[in-house]
Image (cartoon, rainbow, N blue to C red):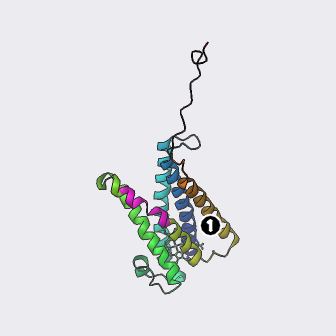
């Protein structure tokens, strides 16, 4: 049972990190107003939302299993108050901070119509801060941080976010492609 909790606790953390990465990249894609892999914009938005909500659920399982797992030595206060843990308090505290930011972004997303577009967008921007916090937490506290597969996976996540981030900061980001000129026999002077 302890082994199952240990594996589930770490596995859900890793998959949540990958989904947060996917969600961040898809969020940028939605903002760019382009389509992707044949999906219309609302389709990309739906996948973005599903990835975020699934990551939130997995983070909840991650925390609950590690709380139940005696090997993790986690206390309920560690889930609420960052940086006061008994083991690697700084890196564990980043996890707590990440959880609080995930909760904020998720709740504001679910209440979008009630809180209004401006407040929603302002809170949603914290996703850019949440992602590096989650990456640092995984590398700093995870027992798999030194394994090749974890280094490769985290490297892929970082490469994806850096790539999408640079695109987001580019001058032509979000510009609609120029409308294609219609070449008719009239315009060709025939
Ligand atoms: C944004 C939210 C979070 C994400 C994305 C996340 C992700 C991760 C990842 C990727 C790992 C490394 C797993 C491994 O090495 O195999 C990890 C480890 C860990 N996380 Fe989180 N985590 C989050 C929040 C939290 C919170 C709120 C807590 C508890 C306060 C927590 C407690 C732990 C502990 C104790 C470990 C170490 C497990 C081990 O020794 O391998 N995490 N987390």
Please check the rendered image and state whether residue 74 is part of the magenta-colored stretch, yes or no. no
Main SS class of the magenta portion in the image: helix
In the rendered image of this protein, does residue 166 appear above or below residue 181? below
Secondary element at tag 1: helix
Furthest-bottom residue in this view: 86
- Number of marks: 1
Report the quarter where the C terminus lies: top right
Furthest-left residue in this view: 114
- The answer to whether residue 69 is visible is no
Please check the rendered image and state whether residue 129 is part of the magenta-colored stretch, yes or no. yes
- The answer to whether residue 29 is visible is yes
Neighbor class of circle 1 (other Cα within 10 Å; few <14, some 14-19, many 20+) is many
User: Where residue 7 sits in the image (x, y, percent)?
Assistant: 59, 72
Q: Residue at x 53, y 68 (%)?
A: 132
User: Where residue 37 sits in the image (x, y, percent)?
Assistant: 59, 43
Furthest-top residue in this view: 190
Q: Residue at x 43, y 60 (%)?
A: 125
Label 1 within 8 A of ligand 1 by Cβ = no
In the rendered image of this protein, does residue 86 appear above or below residue 167? below
User: Where residue 129 sits in the image (x, y, percent)?
Assistant: 48, 66
Which residues lie in the magenta part?
Answer: 120-130
User: Where residue 23 sits in the image (x, y, percent)?
Assistant: 51, 56
Q: Residue at x 38, y 61 (%)?
A: 123
In the rendered image of this protein, does residue 69 appear above or below residue 53? below
In this figure, which residue is indicated by the disc labeled 1? 154
Q: Nearer the viewer, residue 38 or 158?
A: 158
């Amino acid at each position: 049972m302890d082994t199952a909790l240990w594996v589930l606790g770490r596995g859900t953390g890793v998959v949540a990190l990958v989904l947060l990465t996917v969600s961040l990249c898809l969020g940028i894609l939605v903002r760019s107003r382009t389509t992707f892999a044949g999906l219309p914009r609302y389709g990309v938005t739906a996948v973005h939302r599903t990835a975020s909500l699934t990551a939130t659920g997995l983070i909840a399982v991650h925390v609950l299993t590690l709380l139940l797992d005696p090997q993790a030595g986690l206390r309920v206060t560690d889930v609420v108050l960052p940086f006061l843990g008994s083991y690697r308090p700084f890196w564990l505290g980043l996890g707590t901070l990440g959880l609080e930011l995930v909760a904020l972004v998720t709740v504001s997303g679910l209440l979008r119509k009630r809180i209004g577009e401006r407040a929603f967008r302002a809170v949603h921007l914290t996703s850019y801060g949440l992602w590096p916090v989650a990456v640092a937490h995984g590398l700093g506290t995870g027992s798999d941080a030194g394994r090749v597969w974890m280094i490769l996976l985290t490297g892929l996540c970082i490469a994806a976010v850096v790539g999408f981030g640079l695109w987001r900061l580019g001058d032509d980001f979000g510009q609609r492609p120029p409308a294609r000129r219609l070449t008719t026999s009239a315009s060709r002077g025939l």
